[in-house]
Amino acid sequence: MRCRVQTVSILCAVFGAAYSLPCAGQVSLVRDGEARAVIVRAEEPSETSRYAVQELVWHMKRATGVELEVLPESETSTDVHTRTSD
């Protein structure tokens, strides 16, 4: 339970910081009920990384009604603009 609370707190902090920063443009992860992004994970993610991906998918679906697809790095193009490392 403590891990879940920490993860949710971290996600809230990240999203809160993202909304408070000035942006040069907008990035739409979901638009008009359709996914405009995918979540890219490591080929062999750690347990923590797998959990973080599950949480992100869950929160995005809850917020938008759309479930983002999760792909390993090997199945994505090299022009991915934003990523996290494990």
Image (cartoon, grey):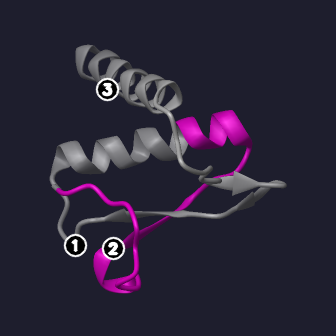
Q: Looking at the rendering, which quadrant does residue 36 occupy?
A: bottom right
Q: Which mark is residue 7?
A: 3
Comes first in the chain, label 1 or label 3: 3
Q: CA distance from mark 1 to mark 3?
A: 22 Å
In the rendered image, residue 75 lying in the magenta stretch gets the answer: yes
Q: Position of residue 13 (x, y in %)?
A: 37, 21
Question: Measured along the vertical axis of the image, is residue 18 above or below residue 79?
Answer: above
Numbered tag placed on residue 72 in the rendering:
2
Residue type for callout 3: Thr
The question of residue 67 being in magenta is answered with yes
Q: Which residue sits at x=54%, y=48%?
A: 24
Left or right placement of residue 58 versus residue 80 in this view: right
Residues 59 and 47: in front is: 59
Q: Residue at x 40, y 73 (%)?
A: 80
Q: Could you tell me if the residues under marks 1 and 2 are in contact, i.e. CB atoms within 8 Å?
A: yes
Q: Which mark is residue 1?
A: none
Q: Is residue 30 above or below residue 19?
A: below
Q: Nearer the viewer, residue 5 or 73?
A: 73
Give the magenta range: 59-85
Which sits earlier in the primary sequence, circle 1 or circle 2?
Answer: 1
In the picture shown, does residue 19 fall above or below 61?
Answer: above
Three-letter residue code for mark 2 = Pro
In this view, the residue in front, 13 or 72, is 13
In the displayed structure image, the side of residue 47 where residue 75 appears, left or right: right
Q: Secondary structure at mark 3?
A: helix
Q: Position of residue 63 (x, y in %)?
A: 67, 34
Q: What's the distance in space between the residues labelled 1 and 2, CA to CA?
A: 5 Å
